[in-house]
Image (cartoon, rainbow, N blue to C red):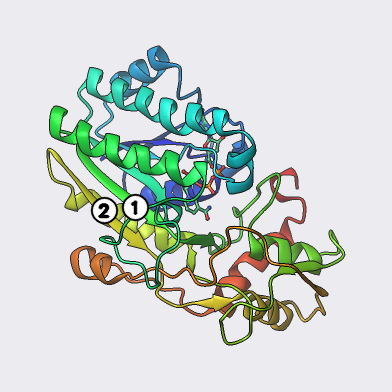
Amino acid sequence: MRILVVGGAGYVGSHCVRHLLRNGHEVKIYDNLSQGHTGAVPEGLLIEGDLHDTDKLKSVLKQNGIEAVFHFAARALVGESVARPDIYYRTNVTGTLDLLDSMVATGVRKIVFSSTCAVFGVVESPISEDLPKNPINPYGFTKLVIERALTDYAAAFGLEVAVLRYFNACGAADDATIGEDHDPESHLIPLVLQVALGQRPNIRIFGTDYPTPDGTCIRDYVHVDDLADAHLRVLNHTVPGRMVDYNLGTGVGVSVRQVIEAARRVTGLPIEAVEDARRPGDPARLMGNPAKAERELGWKAKFTDIEAVIRSAWAWHHAHPRGFAD
Ligand SMILES: NC(=O)c1ccc[n+]([C@@H]2O[C@H](COP(=O)([O-])OP(=O)(O)OC[C@H]3O[C@@H](n4cnc5c(N)ncnc54)[C@H](O)[C@@H]3O)[C@@H](O)[C@H]2O)c1
């Protein structure tokens, strides 16, 4: 299939691109490189462009005979979304509507959208698709608005929509040639590995008095290659005029302390941790229920052992301590 990967120079998108190419698909990447990296994508596939440039989008969709769009492009930092909701609504909401309008105008019907567990807000884990969605920050709201818009566009224009809600994306490609490189970095595993690399003095643990076995927050770490696999599978499960949705988590919860301990074992380095107060808005436990994805897509996360996840991330960070700048 001919697929346009929007935001494909970013972390999750670049891993999906590799997976698509390995499985024989024809790929073009559309990215404004605001956070992405040319080094993350194979030569000759990148078209530099912005979501808001609908003329360019339409001509890219048309000229390349695109049959499906994978849409990863977004701003995705919760704290930043509270301070600058304007940027989040503009990029994530208006930008996605620009993309959808360009698809409708050029007759491209299939779209796979990167959503997030942040659309649920505070609910009991494990989180299944049918739980109520009450996001507690602008980032989660922008994604929920688009989930709704996608449902309405599907019904009105016959689009085939898949919404995939990721839990905590992590890990790196099997040959360690691409991996996570965000600036600023906000994800736990790369931050812990930056301590191992001597790039930061310690890792702060926000809250040690949560109602969890070791008092620290529990999250669901889902490997980028497992996410890529789900994207490929869902291509065969879209339905004209409808939105289908899947929560992509491993179903396994890992605490902050367990991540740090696993990173110490993998790297053989001490990794100093400092206990700090809770941050507002951090639920104690966030885990996905992957039953629907397993049942309908035949998808099951291969990476369920946090040490294997960290080994994969460490291979990348160790070989590229300054990310794509190396
Ligand atoms: N990383 C995670 O843990 C996680 C979890 C849940 C959901 N998600 C979602 O998955 C998607 C990908 O996340 P990521 O971690 O790979 O993010 P990323 O920042 O690494 O990638 C996003 C890409 O989109 C591009 N982009 C941003 N604005 C654009 C615009 N206006 N026009 C064109 N390109 C633009 C950026 O340059 C970047 O390459 C996002 O939609 C995010 O909300 C990520």
For image coordinates 61% across by 60% down, the residue present is 176
Q: Amino acid at mark 1?
A: Leu
Residue 312, picture quadrant? bottom right
Query: What's the amino acid at mark 2?
Result: Asp
Q: Is residue 285 above or below residue 6?
A: below
**Residue at left offset 61%, top offset 77%:** 210
Task: Please indicate, yes or no, whether residue 307 appears anywhere in the rendered image.
Answer: yes
Q: Verify CB contact (< 8 Å) between mark 2 and mark 1.
A: yes
Q: Nearer the viewer, residue 173 or 187?
A: 187
Relative depth, front residue between 230 and 76: 76
Q: Is residue 90 above or below residue 219?
A: above
Report, in whole angstroms, how far the alpha carbon at label 2 lies from the one at label 1.
6 Å
Question: Which residue sits furthest bottom?
Answer: 213
Left or right of 160: which side holds 229? right
Residue at 53% from the left image edge and 66% from the top image edge? 283
User: What residue lies at 29% left-to-right and 21% top-to-bottom?
Assistant: 101
Q: How many marks?
A: 2
**Mark 1 lies on residue:** 164
Give the SS element for disc 1: strand
Residue 46 visible here = no
Q: Would you place residue 11 above or below residue 261 in this image?
A: above
Residue on which the image places disc 2: 245
- Please indicate whether residue 290 sits to the left or right of residue 95 in the image: left
